[in-house]
C-alpha cells in the first residue's frame, strides 16, 4: 500500500515537471549559482536515501510469505514428542461408550485424522461432557464453533434433529470441520504463507480460527502449553500400540512435557510409569522407600498419585542413564520435601499471605477470588498465572477451580511436575534441564525460589534443600554430583 501511493505521487510529479524541468534548472542556476544548488542537491539525495531505507524496512516487515526454513517446527520433532495419533484405537479408554462408534466412524472423513486424534481433542474440549456450554456459542462434546456447526452439522444419529448436544452429530461435525480446515491449511503451507506442521496448525485453527493462524504466520515456536500440544499430548492415551515418546528427539526441548500412553506391550500409562520407578534399570523408588522418605506425610500425597502424574511426563526420571534418573528423582523429591514440610502441608500455612497471589492485570483476572491462588501441592503452586498455565498444560481448568490441586492427589503431583519440567522461574533453565545437564542441584533451587534464597538471600533455606537432596540421593544409591549450592 505504501509503495503504491509513492508510485502514484511520483507519476503525478512527472506530469507536472516534465514540461519545464530543463528551464527550471537553468533558471535556478542563473539565480543562485552552482554552489548552493550542489548543496541543495546533496540534501535532496540524503532525503531520497532515507525514504528508500524506510520503504525497504517497511516492505521487509509487511506480512507476506514466510520462509519455512527460518521458523518451521520440524514435523519429525513433533511426531517424536507426541506421536502422530495413528495406530490401534484404545476404545476402552473412552469414558463414554456412546461416543466410541461415532468417533470411529467420523475418523474416516479424511486421512489427516484418526480415532485417537478425535478422542484426544474431545478430552481437551469438554472432558467428554456432551452437555457442555462453552464460550462463543460452542456447545456439546466436541465444542465445534457455532458457525461451523451450522454449516457442517448433520443428523448423524438419525433422531430427526441436528443438534450440537447430540454426541454423534457433534463428533461428526468435529471431523468435517477438521478436514475442511486441513484442506485450507494445506494451501497456506504450499504457498509459504504459514509455517508449521499440518496437524498442529489444523488443531490450532479449530480453536483460534483460520484467520488467526494466517495472521500469526503459523506456529513459529514449540510451546508445550499451546492448544495443539494439549491435544497431541493425549494421543498415546488413546492408542494401544503407541511407542514411548523419545526423550532425545532432534531439536526437542529437554523440558518438553507430554503425556504418554500404553507401551508396545499394551501396558497402561500408570504401569509404564510404575516400571520407571520399580525396575532395576529405573530409578529404583519403591512404595516402602517412598514412605521411609516421608514418614510423616499427609495421606493426601500418595505414591499412586506420583505414578499417575509421572505417566503424563515421560521425560521425568526417564532420560539418561540410571544414575541420572535417580539423581533427578532425588532432586525433585528434595525440593518437594522442603516446599511441603515433608509432604505434610497441602496448602500454604500462612493464610495472611493468601491474598498476595492474584495478578489482576492479566486479561483473565482471578475468577476464583483474590485469595484463591495461594500455595498448594507438593511444590506449592502459587499465583493465578501459574494456575492457568499449569491447568492449560495438563488439560484441566485450574484458573476457575484451583482447589483441585488440594482435592486430587494426581493433579497436585502433576502441577509439581509441570513446574519442574517446563518452568525456569528465577533461573535460566528448568529444574529438569539443570539436574539432567550441567546445572546441578543448585540450579533447581534457583528455578524454584532463587529470587529469595540464592546468592546469599537465605542460606539456611538453601542448606535445608541440599541436606534433603543428599539424604534422598543416598537412599537411592546415587552420587549427588557437583554444583549443589546456588
Image (tube, helix red, strand yellow):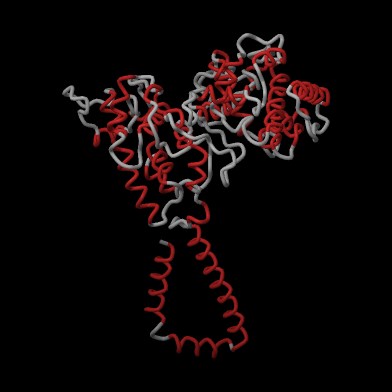
User: In the rendered view of the protein, which quadrant contains the C terminus?
Assistant: top right
Q: Is residue 458 above or below residue 19?
A: above
* Horizontal arrangement in the rendering, residue 408 relative to residue 8 (left or right): right
Image spot of residue 136 (x, y percent): 36, 30
Count of numbered badges drawn on the protein: 0
* Horizontal arrangement in the rendering, residue 152 relative to residue 222 (left or right): left
Image spot of residue 148 (x, y percent): 29, 36
Image spot of residue 98 (x, y percent): 30, 20
Q: Nearer the viewer, residue 278 or 345?
A: 278
User: In the rendered view of the protein, which quadrant contains the N terminus?
Assistant: bottom left
Q: Is residue 57 above or below residue 197?
A: below
- Examine the rendering and report whether any part of residue 414 can be seen: no
- Examine the rendering and report whether any part of residue 174 can be seen: yes
Q: Nearer the viewer, residue 50 or 21?
A: 50
* Horizontal arrangement in the rendering, residue 329 relative to residue 4 (left or right): right
Q: Image quarter for residue 280?
A: top right
Q: Residue at x 77, y 28 (%)?
A: 453
Residue sticking out furthest to the left: 160
Image spot of residue 206 (x, y percent): 37, 37
* Horizontal arrangement in the rendering, residue 173 relative to residue 425 (left or right): left
Q: Residue at x 70, y 39 (%)?
A: 437
Q: Residue at x 61, y 36 (%)?
A: 255
Q: Residue at x 37, y 78 (%)?
A: 15
Q: Image quarter for residue 30?
A: bottom right
Amino acid at each position: 500500500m505504501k509503495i503504491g501511493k509513492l508510485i502514484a505521487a511520483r507519476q503525478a510529479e512527472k506530469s507536472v515537471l516534465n514540461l519545464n524541468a530543463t528551464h527550471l534548472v537553468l533558471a535556478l542556476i542563473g539565480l543562485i549559482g552552482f554552489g548552493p544548488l550542489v548543496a541543495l542537491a546533496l540534501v535532496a539525495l540524503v532525503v531520497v536515501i532515507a525514504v528508500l531505507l524506510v520503504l525497504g524496512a517497511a516492505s521487509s516487515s509487511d506480512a507476506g510469505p514466510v520462509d519455512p526454513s527460518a521458523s518451521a517446527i520440524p514435523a519429525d520433532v513433533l511426531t517424536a514428542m507426541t506421536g502422530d495419533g495413528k495406530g490401534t484405537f484404545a476404545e476402552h479408554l473412552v469414558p463414554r461408550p456412546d461416543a466410541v462408534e461415532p468417533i470411529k466412524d467420523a475418523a474416516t472423513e479424511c486421512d489427516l485424522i484418526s480415532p485417537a486424534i478425535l478422542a484426544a481433542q474431545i478430552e481437551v474440549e469438554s472432558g467428554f461432557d456432551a452437555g457442555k456450554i462453552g464460550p462463543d456459542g460452542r456447545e456439546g462434546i466436541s465444542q465445534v464453533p457455532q458457525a461451523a456447526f451450522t454449516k457442517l452439522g448433520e443428523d448423524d444419529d438419525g433422531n430427526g434433529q441436528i443438534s450440537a448436544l447430540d454426541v454423534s452429530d457433534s463428533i461428526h461435525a468435529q471431523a468435517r470441520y477438521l478436514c475442511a480446515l486441513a484442506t485450507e491449511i494445506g494451501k497456506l503451507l504450499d504457498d509459504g504463507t504459514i509455517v508449521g506442521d499440518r496437524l498442529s496448525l489444523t488443531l490450532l485453527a479449530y480453536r483460534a480460527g483460520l484467520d488467526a493462524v494466517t495472521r500469526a504466520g503459523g506456529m513459529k515456536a514449540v510451546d508445550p502449553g499451546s492448544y495443539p500440544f494439549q491435544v497431541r499430548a493425549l494421543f498415546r492415551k488413546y492408542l494401544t500400540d503407541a511407542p514411548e515418546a523419545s526423550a532425545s528427539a532432534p531439536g526437542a526441548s529437554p523440558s518438553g512435557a507430554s503425556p504418554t500412553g500404553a507401551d508396545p506391550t499394551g501396558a497402561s500409562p500408570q504401569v509404564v510409569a510404575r516400571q520407571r520407578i520399580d525396575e532395576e534399570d529405573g530409578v529404583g523408588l519403591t512404595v516402602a522407600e517412598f514412605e521411609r522418605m516421608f514418614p510423616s506425610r499427609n495421606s493426601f500425597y500418595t505414591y499412586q498419585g506420583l505414578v499417575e502424574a509421572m505417566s503424563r511426563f515421560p521425560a521425568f526420571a526417564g532420560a539418561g542413564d540410571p544414575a541420572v534418573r535417580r539423581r533427578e528423582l532425588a532432586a525433585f523429591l528434595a525440593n518437594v520435601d522442603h516446599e511441603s514440610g515433608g509432604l505434610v502441608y497441602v496448602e500454604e500455612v500462612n493464610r495472611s499471605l493468601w491474598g498476595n497471589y492474584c495478578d489482576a492485570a492479566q486479561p483473565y483476572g482471578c475468577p476464583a477470588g483474590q485469595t484463591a491462588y495461594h500455595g498448594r501441592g507438593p511444590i506449592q503452586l502459587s499465583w493465578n498465572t501459574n494456575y492457568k498455565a499449569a491447568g492449560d498444560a495438563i488439560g484441566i481448568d485450574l484458573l476457575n477451580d484451583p482447589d483441585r490441586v488440594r482435592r486430587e492427589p494426581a493433579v497436585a503431583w502433576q502441577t509439581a511436575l509441570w513446574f519442574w519440567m517446563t518452568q525456569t522461574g528465577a533461573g535460566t533453565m528448568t529444574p529438569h534441564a539443570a539436574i539432567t545437564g550441567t546445572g546441578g542441584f543448585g540450579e533447581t533451587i534457583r528455578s524454584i525460589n532463587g529470587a529469595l534464597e540464592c546468592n546469599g538471600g537465605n542460606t539456611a533455606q538453601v542448606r535445608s534443600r541440599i541436606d534433603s537432596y543428599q539424604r534422598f540421593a543416598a537412599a537411592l544409591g546415587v552420587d549427588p554430583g557437583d554444583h549443589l549450592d546456588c
